[in-house]
């Protein structure tokens, strides 16, 4: 029989061992809430504890309520006890992020439905993975099945007897009534408030402090501080800043998404000796960028007004913003969490370092390995790392076998196979995480639960000793009936059905609804282990996918990714057509999304080539305005070898342009999408002074006589909307666009 203890002794052991505990309450929502309230009362929970749920708890305690969409407020904070209401959405991202704020001696109380029926529960968190499919479907529920398997391995606590272990589960069927708990533990289980003793740097932290101190002796340098949660990054930064303020005359600015994110950082500074507060300031991200971007050109030299910029919780800030911020000082320190659940995820490591190495003379990467907020053997951290696969490491067969005469096999793997093969799941998920800059724990749920995903794995080794060294993950799109009314709404820009990124984009840009009728696969991620690259293995995965598409009568496949010339070179091996480049940079990657398709049906070859030709022609128009930062080399890669013809067509007004202008006037496409047609129309008018360009709207038929002043000016200055509004006394972009439409119609005469 397992050892049992009074509840008070268990909580005291958490404090003395510097551990955090997990209590899973499984049952009806009302029962879970009641039992959680009893536990919070027993530990004397106050405002330092949080209840994470969509709705405010009715427990009568002084604990704080936090909605899931505001969970980033917990970054950089200390939480005594935490309740996560899985009934309101069991989010892997939220669980991972919130648990990182829980301090030693605290309890994570997780409320979930009865385990036997949980996988049939319509979890609100499914909404983020919803994809519009031609026929109704249900999520697999395998992520919950896997969670149940982990929870069932916990020490089961029954009645009023509490297991001696820190990881516990209580089921309503075993304990339907109230707990026999002390009315209060008189604060014994609460995490003590920070004091000076807590800010004595560890060996790890001292190395960070010394390295940041060394920045003061360099004219240009950047330091990246990476660590898992609870390693004391904020405290180390605070102590380093205090040291610099005491020993140098540097002016220092601290930046974070929210002021609450750097509470511990400033607490660490304030618990030390006095310093000159005028040389230290905190700024919200938007505030600092707005102030500096709003300065006149005559004061551009004053933008670099800080000697050192410290950016905490950097992974929660979009990469393009980080690039701008890093230009505000000659020395920059960035701190981020290794596990990618705070924001940009792997993009911070995969993309940002490369850009910084060009901007700064020296780049330093620092790491904190030992936990500060809890012990290194913390049972909760170990459990959540396993549950959410936060501790993924490379698992290629090359680690144990020489890469000589390696045999490779490719097979299609189902989500159910992943559920029952933990080793396979871990290897697949590891490669997927390493291959992409936007990686989150929720990717694990989508991999297991979304029935519209298709996965191929490439393995090496013998039949009973294989290792995954390659993965290809695809999403099914399209397949809607030709008479589906939704297709017209997509073409008119009124609907953008989730889970149909490529197909709905093709329909909306072209006005041809058939693209959503066709069945297609979109490649979401493809990854090969670094030790097995340059052997044609990625091509083998693509060829396997194409054979599958042919056999199952798919019409085309495609992909969408952040444009980088090296990536495009890879995809061009497969005779694929480029059909779209985003006009705006992705918030996370800092890159423009590029879309490519390849027809698998003979009847789509011409349509695909035409879509690619239209893209190349429009690209030349966009390059003069929206994409003027696109290099000539990248333009050459995107347009191919027919640039002479494209250059000519870029200024030639066509029947397609007439249709695009019609769609613009009928509110089917945006000004941005109609811009190439408008530009060609204006320049064709200016060059030929021809009359009677035919345009049709919903109300009437029109012949356009001439271009109005606003239209010409807008074409010449877009997308600089302020210059356009100032010139014509308009209030904003929306009013400008409406005025252009009015002007186009006013400059016409009825047929």
Image: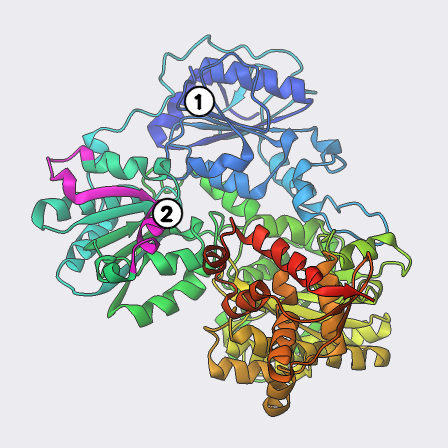
Neighbor class of circle 1 (other Cα within 10 Å; few <14, some 14-19, many 20+) is many
Q: Can you give x and y, in whole percent of width and height, for residue 604 in the image? A: 82, 77
How many callouts does the rendering have? 2
Q: Which residues are magenta?
A: 270-296
**Quadrant in the picture for the N terminus:** top right
Residue at image coords 66%, 58%: 741
Q: Which residue is mark 1?
A: 10
Q: Nearer the viewer, residue 590 or 201?
A: 590
**Quadrant in the picture for the C terminus:** bottom right
Q: Is residue 330 visible?
A: yes
Residue lying at the far front in this picture: please name it: 749
In magenta segment, residue 397: no
Neighbor class of circle 2 (other Cα within 10 Å; few <14, some 14-19, many 20+) is some
Q: Can you give x and y, in whole percent of width and height, for residue 6 in the image? A: 47, 16
Q: Is residue 532 visible?
A: no
Q: Which residue is mark 2?
A: 285
In magenta segment, residue 290: yes
SS type, badge 2 = helix
C-alpha span from label 2 to label 1: 43 Å
Side of 144 relative to 289 (left or right): right
Residue at image coords 80%, 82%: 606
Side of 511 relative to 251 (left or right): right
User: Does label 2 or label 1 sit earlier along the sequence?
Assistant: 1
Residue lying at the far top in this picture: please name it: 183
Q: Is residue 196 above or below residue 96?
A: above
Name which quarter of the figure residue 676 lies in. bottom right
Q: Nearer the viewer, residue 157 or 578?
A: 578
Q: Can you give x and y, in whole percent of width and height, for residue 80 in the image? A: 40, 26
């Amino acid at each position: 029989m397992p050892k049992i203890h009074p509840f008070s002794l268990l909580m005291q052991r958490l404090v003395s061992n510097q551990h955090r505990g997990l209590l899973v309450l499984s049952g009806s929502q009302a029962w879970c809430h009641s039992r959680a309230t009893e536990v919070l009362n027993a530990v004397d929970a106050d405002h330092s504890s949080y209840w994470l749920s969509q709705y405010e708890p009715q427990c009568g305690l002084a604990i704080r309520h936090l909605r899931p969409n505001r969970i980033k407020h917990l970054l950089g904070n200390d939480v005594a006890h935490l309740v996560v209401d899985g009934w309101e959405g069991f989010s892997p991202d939220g669980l991972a992020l919130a648990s990182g704020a829980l301090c030693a001696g605290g309890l994570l109380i997780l409320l979930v439905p009865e385990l036997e029926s949980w996988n049939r529960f319509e979890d609100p968190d499914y909404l983020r993975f919803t994809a519009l499919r031609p026929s109704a479907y249900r999520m697999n529920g395998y992520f919950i099945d896997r969670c149940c398997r982990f929870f069932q391995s916990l020490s089961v606590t029954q009645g009023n007897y509490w297991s001696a272990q820190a990881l516990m589960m209580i089921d309503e069927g075993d304990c339907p009534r109230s707990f026999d708990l002390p009315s209060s533990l008189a604060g014994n289980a609460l995490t003590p408030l920070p004091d000076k003793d807590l800010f004595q740097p560890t060996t790890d932290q001292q190395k960070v402090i010394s390295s940041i101190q060394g920045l003061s002796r360099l004219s240009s340098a950047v330091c990246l501080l990476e660590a898992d949660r609870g390693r004391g990054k904020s405290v180390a930064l605070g102590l380093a800043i205090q040291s610099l303020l005491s020993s140098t005359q540097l002016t220092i600015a601290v930046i974070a998404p929210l002021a609450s994110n750097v509470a511990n950082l400033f607490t660490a500074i304030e618990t030390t000796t006095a310093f000159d507060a005028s040389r230290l300031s905190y700024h919200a991200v938007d505030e600092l960028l707005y102030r500096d971007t709003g300065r006149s050109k005559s004061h551009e030299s004053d933008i670099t007004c800080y000697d050192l910029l410290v950016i905490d919780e950097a992974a929660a800030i979009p990469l393009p913003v980080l690039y701008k911020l890093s230009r505000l000082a000659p020395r920059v320190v960035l701190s981020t969490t290794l596990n990618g659940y705070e924001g940009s995820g792997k993009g911070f490591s995969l993309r940002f370092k490369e850009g910084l190495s060009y901007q700064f003379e020296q780049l330093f990467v620092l790491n904190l390995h030992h936990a500060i907020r809890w012990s290194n053997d913390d049972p909760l951290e170990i459990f959540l790392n396993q549950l959410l696969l936060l501790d993924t490491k490379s698992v290629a067969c090359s680690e144990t076998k020489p890469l000589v005469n390696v045999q490779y096999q490719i097979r299609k793997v189902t989500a159910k196979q992943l559920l029952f093969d933990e080793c396979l799941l871990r290897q697949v998920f590891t490669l997927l995480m390493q291959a992409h800059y936007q990686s989150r724990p929720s990717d694990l749920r989508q991999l297991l639960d979304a029935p519209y995903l298709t996965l191929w794995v490439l393995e090496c080794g013998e039949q009973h000793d294989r290792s995954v060294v390659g993965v290809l993950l695809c999403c099914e799109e399209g397949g809607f009936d030709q008479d589906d009314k939704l297709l017209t709404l997509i073409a008119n820009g009124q609907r953008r059905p989730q889970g149909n990124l490529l197909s709905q984009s093709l329909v909306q840009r072209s006005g041809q609804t058939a693209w959503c009728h066709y069945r297609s696969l979109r490649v979401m991620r493809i990854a090969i282990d670094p030790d097995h690259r340059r052997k044609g293995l990625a091509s083998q995965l693509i060829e396997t996918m194409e054979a599958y598409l042919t056999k199952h009568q798919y019409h085309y496949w495609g992909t969408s990714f952040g444009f980088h010339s090296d990536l495009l070179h890879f995809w061009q091996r497969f005779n694929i057509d480029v059909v779209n480049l985003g006009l705006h940079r992705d918030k996370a990657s800092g890159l423009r999304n590029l879309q490519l398709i390849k027809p698998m049906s003979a009847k789509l070859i011409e349509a695909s080539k035409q879509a690619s030709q239209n893209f190349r022609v429009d690209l030349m128009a966009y390059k003069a305005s929206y994409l003027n930062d696109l290099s000539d080399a990248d333009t050459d890669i995107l347009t191919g070898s027919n640039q002479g013809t494209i250059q000519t067509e870029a200024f030639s007004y066509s029947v397609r342009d007439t249709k695009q202008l019609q769609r613009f006037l009928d509110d089917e496409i945006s000004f941005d999408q109609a811009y190439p047609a408008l530009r060609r129309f204006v320049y064709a008018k200016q060059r030929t002074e021809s009359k009677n360009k035919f345009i049709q709207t919903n109300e009437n038929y029109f012949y356009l006589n001439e271009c109005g002043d606003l239209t010409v000016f807008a074409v010449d200055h877009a997308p600089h909307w302020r210059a356009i509004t100032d010139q014509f006394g308009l209030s904003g972009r929306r009013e400008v666009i409406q005025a252009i439409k009015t002007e186009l119609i006013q400059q016409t005469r009825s047929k």
